[in-house]
Image (tube, helix red, strand yellow):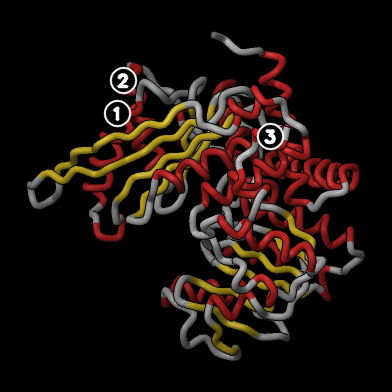
Amino acid sequence: MESMYSSSYVDDIREIKEENPFESMMSRFDRAAQLLELDADLYAVMRVPNRELKVYIPTRMDSGRMQVFEGYRVQHNFARGPAKGGIRYSPDVTLDEVRALAAWMTWKCAVVNVPFGGAKGGVICDPQQMSLGELERMTRRYAAELVDFIGPEKDVPAPDMNTNEQTMAWIMDTYSMHARHTVTACVTGKPVDLGGSSGRREATGRGLLFVINEAVKRFQMAPTSTRVVVQGSGNVGGIAAELLHEAGYKIVAISDVHGGIYNPAGIDIPNALKYLRTTRSFEGYEGVETVSNHELLELDCDVLVPAATENQITSQNADKIKCKVLAEGANGPTTAAADEMLHQKGIFVIPDILANAGGVTVSYFEWVQDRMGYFWREDVVNQRLQDTMVASFNDLCRYADAHSVDTRTAAYMLAIDRVAYDTRIRGFYA
């Protein structure tokens, strides 16, 4: 069996290019597949995406000239249902990154037992340098290029980095114009008045709260004495920090893209985030020490929440991480090369494919509500999210204990096992 697996993990983890999220994801897939003794045919099918699309997006800029942007949509797996995943706009988008994120979505949906496969999209652009009109024209043309490949029963996009409710509204409208009727279920993360779900904006941060609560119980810690460090203050980190603060946790550090603030006695998170929204930086906030994002990760704490971006904990700094629980709010914040180092230190990792799955879980709820035309109260959404996250956390811990593996490996094994089962039962159409 061993010879069929990629050598990237099995032979020498150090050969992986840590900055490449696809290679990092694949090394973990190979490790889990080997431990599961995954059938060679299933391995060959599951390790590659179902479809990769590259599109060129001509857009009329405000100056009157045409600019052509490059965009991608990777649809990784359809075994359990329609593909699902966000769209990001960034100058740094690469096909390898989108591939990795699409695969992560497959495993994420499987870990929380949501009937979706994984997908991801991206456009290489700098949205900070574009007007609202330019963004709308680019978004609509991108959606038009994808219209034959997306939809409620094919692939359901959602917001991601530098995209939002407005972006989803443009995509929904463009898709609906081609369909000649309104199709609210073609995207999620929409404004509530356009068929979005109550609780969707806070869902990823709230999901983090639920799994952190379970980890704290597991280690018999009390929230009021649990010191938390949060890297990131956006839709994931900021909301998670607010909810954790509200639940009684002591947030001792938080950061934005420019750097962070630290106070071992705890930070008034609502006040700090209000300051950030006003000044667009934590610089000048009183009663705290300033720290870099790099230094913030190495602070002594009980729970560390990297909720910013990929590749923050690597083989270069993993030995300096001092938390008891690592709850990954971002996608891929820890490289594969750092995994074993964290395991050796005894750090309990709540891997990204579970920790930040609150967003896709409530996206699934939104899709369900759109398709039946009946919408739930926010308290119902939040309760169903809690039920899903707690059950998934317990599934993961049982799987890790039963197979005597770390939680990261267990999460991949659990996800791959579920996708492999559905693929095996469906059989191969050829």
How far apart in space, not on screen, are marks 3 and 2 (Cα)? 31 Å
Q: Is residue 199 visible?
A: no
Q: Which of the two labelled residues, at mark 3 and mark 1, occupies the earlier sequence position? A: 3
Residue shown at 45% from the left, 34% from the top: 74
Q: Which of the two labelled residues, at mark 3 and mark 2, occupies the earlier sequence position? A: 3
Left or right: where does residue 393 sit relative to residue 330?
right
The answer to whether the residues at label 2 and label 1 have Cβ atoms under 8 Å apart is: yes
Position in image of residue 426 (x %, y %)? 66, 13
How far apart in space, not on screen, are marks 2 and 1 (Cα)? 8 Å
Residue where numbered disc 3 is placed? 110
**Above or below for 72 versus 322:** above
How far apart in space, not on screen, are marks 3 and 1 (Cα)? 29 Å
Q: Residue furthest top?
A: 430
Position in image of residue 40 (x %, y %)? 67, 26
Label 3 is placed on what type of residue?
Answer: Ala
Q: Nearer the viewer, mark 3 or mark 1?
A: 3
Quadrant of the image occupied by residue 258? bottom left
Label 1 is placed on what type of residue?
Answer: Ala
Q: Which mark is residue 178?
A: 2
- In terms of secondary structure, where does tag 1 sit? helix
- In terms of secondary structure, where does tag 3 sit? helix
- In terms of secondary structure, where does tag 2 sit? helix
Position in image of residue 163 (x %, y %)? 40, 49
Q: Which mark is residue 144?
A: 1
Q: Quadrant of the C terminus?
A: top right
Q: Which of the two labelled residues, at mark 2 and mark 1, occupies the earlier sequence position? A: 1
Residue closest to the eye, 220 or 198: 220
Residue shown at 65% from the left, 78% from the top: 298
Q: Is residue 326 visible?
A: yes
Left or right: where does residue 90 sit relative to residue 303?
left
Position in image of residue 383 (x %, y %)? 75, 42
